[in-house]
């Protein structure tokens, strides 16, 4: 019982014997509880620090135990005072943290919620995922995702899904060939998340609870930073953009079949459209998350299907058939 007050078990035993046998010296105390005299001396030092023993008036050179009514009550009073002081320190620390968070929020607002660099983006995502209550959706363009970026989102996504939050992730069709992204997407599916892919995606985007969003400052280099948006009009437009892309995407694991009327896959149709606007193979491949060489293979398949000997002829025939 006395151990709960901060005494070691041996010191508590020494204290009890001293209360019962006030005249015992060190050797007799050691014999009574089965320890060495050195251990008794250590216990007496401990009891002295706790003010549970004092110098004996009756036995000069010896110590006497302070009665529990006095010694233990004094100990409790000191511990209560220490606890009150720690509580005051905790309250002061909490107030300081609250002020710091408020100051940072004001600073972020003054700078248009600009988050510069991946560390700043990851920190904000951690906060958003910790506080999300109903839904988090994301658009992740590109042929692959960096393994370290995928790993950074695991804990937040897992905790949110466990709380019943709906998590929807939209990847590019090209990521179906990337083992890291595919493994991560299947892990999300295993937790009950929803994952779809599409040939072409809007810019990178994260929307939380349909009330705030992160969009890249520079879509050409999303690692530069992001803008944290909370204006309802802008967030609403981003939600609509996501829903349009989501509606035409295919769930991961489902085969993306060709158009029954044309035989074109979604990627081939988008490729024809992009090249028809004048984009180069490299630019069209970048939009689709595929290499220029893969663009060439797709176009060769389309030309063979159309019976065309050149891309120009393929474009004319595709338009004639209503493929564009």
Image (cartoon, rainbow, N blue to C red):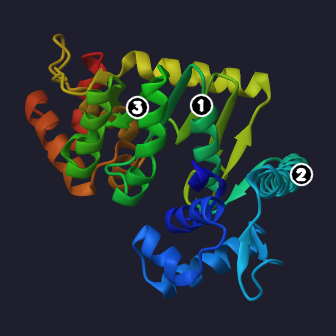
Q: Nearer the viewer, residue 208 or 265?
A: 208
- Residue 263 rendering spot, x and y as whole percentages: 14, 20
Instruction: Name the N-terminal-most of marks 3 and 2.
Output: 2
- Tell me the residue that label 2 is attached to: 88
- Residue 173 rendering spot, x and y as whole percentages: 28, 36
C-alpha span from label 2 to label 1 = 39 Å
Helix, strand or loop for disc 1: strand
How packed mark 1 is, by other alpha carbons closer than 10 Å (few <14, some 14-19, many 20 or more), is many
Which picture quadrant has residue 60? Answer: bottom right
Instruction: Name the N-terminal-most of marks 1 and 3.
Output: 3
- Residue 172 rendering spot, x and y as whole percentages: 34, 38
Question: Which quarter shows the C terminus?
Answer: top left
Question: Mark 2 and 1 residues: CB-CB less than 8 Å, in contact?
Answer: no
Question: Mark 1 and 3 residues: CB-CB less than 8 Å, in contact?
Answer: no
Residue 40 showing in the rendered view: yes
Helix, strand or loop for disc 2: helix
Instruction: Name the N-terminal-most of marks 2 and 1.
Output: 2
Q: Is residue 107 above or below residue 264?
A: below
Residue 201 showing in the rendered view: no
Left or right for 80, reference 21 = right
Front tag of 3 and 2 = 2
Q: Nearer the viewer, residue 84 or 131?
A: 84
Q: Is residue 94 above or below residue 18?
A: above
Which picture quadrant has residue 218? Answer: bottom right
Front tag of 1 and 3 = 1
- Tell me the residue that label 1 is attached to: 207
C-alpha span from label 3 to label 2 = 48 Å
Give the residue drawn at x 13%, y 28%. Answer: 306
C-alpha span from label 1 to label 3 = 12 Å
Q: Nearer the viewer, residue 218 or 81?
A: 81
Q: Is residue 218 above or below residue 215?
A: below
- Tell me the residue that label 3 is attached to: 170
């Amino acid at each position: 019982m006395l151990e709960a007050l901060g005494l070691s078990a041996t010191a508590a035993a020494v204290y009890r014997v001293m209360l019962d046998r006030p005249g015992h010296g060190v050797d007799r105390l050691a014999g009574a509880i089965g320890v060495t005299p050195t251990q008794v001396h250590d216990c007496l030092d401990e009891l002295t620090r706790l003010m549970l023993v004092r110098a004996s008036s009756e036995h000069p050179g010896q110590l006497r135990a302070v009665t529990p009514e006095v010694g233990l009550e004094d100990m409790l009073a000191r511990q209560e005072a220490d606890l009150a002081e720690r509580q005051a320190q905790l309250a002061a620390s909490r107030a300081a943290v609250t002020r710091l968070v408020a100051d940072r929020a004001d600073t972020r607002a003054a700078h248009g919620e600009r988050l510069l660099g991946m560390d700043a983006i990851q920190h904000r995502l951690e906060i958003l995922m910790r506080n999300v209550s109903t839904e988090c959706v994301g658009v992740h363009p590109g042929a692959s995702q960096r393994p370290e970026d995928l790993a950074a989102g695991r804990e937040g996504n897992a905790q949110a899904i466990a709380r019943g939050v709906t998590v929807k992730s939209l990847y590019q069709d090209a990521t179906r060939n990337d083992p890291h992204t595919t493994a991560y997407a299947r892990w999300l599916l295993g937790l009950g998340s929803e994952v779809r892919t599409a040939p072409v995606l809007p810019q990178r985007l994260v929307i939380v609870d349909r009330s705030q969003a992160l969009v890249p400052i520079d879509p050409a280099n999303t690692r530069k930073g992001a803008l944290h948006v909370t204006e309802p009009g802008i967030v609403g437009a981003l939600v609509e953009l996501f829903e349009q892309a989501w509606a035409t995407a295919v769930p991961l694991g489902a085969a993306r079949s060709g158009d029954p009327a044309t035989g074109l896959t979604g990627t081939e149709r988008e490729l024809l459209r992009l090249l028809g606007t004048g984009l180069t193979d490299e630019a069209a491949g970048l939009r689709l998350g595929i290499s220029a060489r893969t663009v060439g293979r797709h176009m060769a398949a389309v030309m063979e299907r159309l019976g065309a000997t050149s891309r120009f002829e393929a474009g004319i025939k595709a338009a004639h058939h209503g493929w564009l």
